[in-house]
Amino acid sequence: MKISDAISNIKNYHHGYDSTGKKINDEQARDQILYGNAEQKCTGIITTIFASIDVIRQAHELGANLIIVHEALFWNHGDHQGWLEETKNHTYRMKKNLLNDYGIVVWRNHDYVHSGIPLEDGSYTDGIFYGFAKEMGWENYASKKANALTKFEIPEIRAKNLVKKMIQCLNLKGGRIIGNPEAKIRRIEIPFHIFGNANDEIIKMDTDKVDALLAMELVDFSINEYVRDSSMLGKNKVIITLGHFNMEEPGMKYMATYIPTALNEDIPCYFVQSGDTFHYVY
């Protein structure tokens, strides 16, 4: 099977419609071949959140020439390379040479996996957050009201113990808590990107009585301050932050389990963890 055919089959496995109900436009989607010649035979597949140098090396060691990522390859939205070529960026050139030497293709699966993977009842759910819930053992604690598995009501646990569990389940080095580490947590929500204004998240956290946000991006000057003040007033409000890639990578781990079904062909498929973004110094 050609790599291009494998990609086509994997796309077709997903729901293929965005949150507004429109069919994903392949020309406009983030899901593009970011590097390499997709007309070659597929010798093996790696799934990961980000094709780091180490992931590329491991793909080669495993004999895989297709790396499926969820995020960009060359460190910018849209994966533009012109500015890197113009400035003769050294890291860019070395990474590109490595891909060339190994004959590796990198394809980004972003919009398709978020559009939904099929469940046993015939419905679809966001594949990234399903993978996260699966890894945490929270599938049965998810809110029925959420389109994706981003809202949970779990058995009561203290915030610090929840972080310890997440570190263990997701194979991470550490995590951060904003608020009281001893806070008792039951209602959890994963918000989407918080780059600045967080008025909506603050309102929801208050009115929906959310105990913990599992945030991917944060800034200090909005919801962080709200949670700190709430905590100082004795409220069960915390933010747990592990990092964007660390939160979404379980979805790419789960992807490796259904790709064989999507391909209907015996092609080796492996998950390679890109690894914790952070080092912690105590």
Image (cartoon, rainbow, N blue to C red):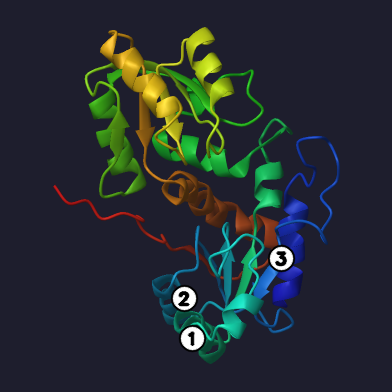
Q: Earlier in the sequence, mark 1 or mark 2?
A: 2
Q: Residue furthest left?
A: 282
Q: Is residue 101 left or right of residue 127?
A: left
Q: Secondary structure at mark 2?
A: helix
The residue identified by callout 2 is: 56
Q: Residue furthest bottom?
A: 101
Q: Earlier in the sequence, mark 1 or mark 3?
A: 3
Comparing 22 with 198, the one in front is 198
> Looking at the image, can residue 156 be seen?
no
- How far apart marks 3 and 2 lie (CA) works out to 18 Å
The residue identified by callout 3 is: 32
The reply to whether the C-beta atoms of the residues labelled 1 and 2 are less than 8 Å apart is yes
Q: Residue at x 84, y 54 (%)?
A: 25
Q: Earlier in the sequence, mark 3 or mark 2?
A: 3
Rendered location of residue 194, percent (x, y): 53, 36
- Tell me the amino acid under the disc marked 3: Gln
- Tell me the amino acid under the disc marked 1: Leu
- Give residue 1's quadrant in the image: bottom right
The reply to whether the C-beta atoms of the residues labelled 1 and 3 are less than 8 Å apart is no
Q: Secondary structure at mark 3?
A: loop
Please, is residue 268 above or below residue 249 in the view? below
The residue identified by callout 1 is: 98
Q: Secondary structure at mark 1?
A: helix
Q: Residues within 10 Å of mark 2 (few under 14, many from 20)?
A: many
Rendered location of residue 147, percent (x, y): 67, 28
Which disc number belongs to residue 59? none
Q: Residues within 10 Å of mark 3 (few under 14, many from 20)?
A: some
> Looking at the image, can residue 118 be seen?
yes
Please, is residue 66 above or below residue 272 in the view? below
Please, is residue 265 above or below residue 209 in the view? below
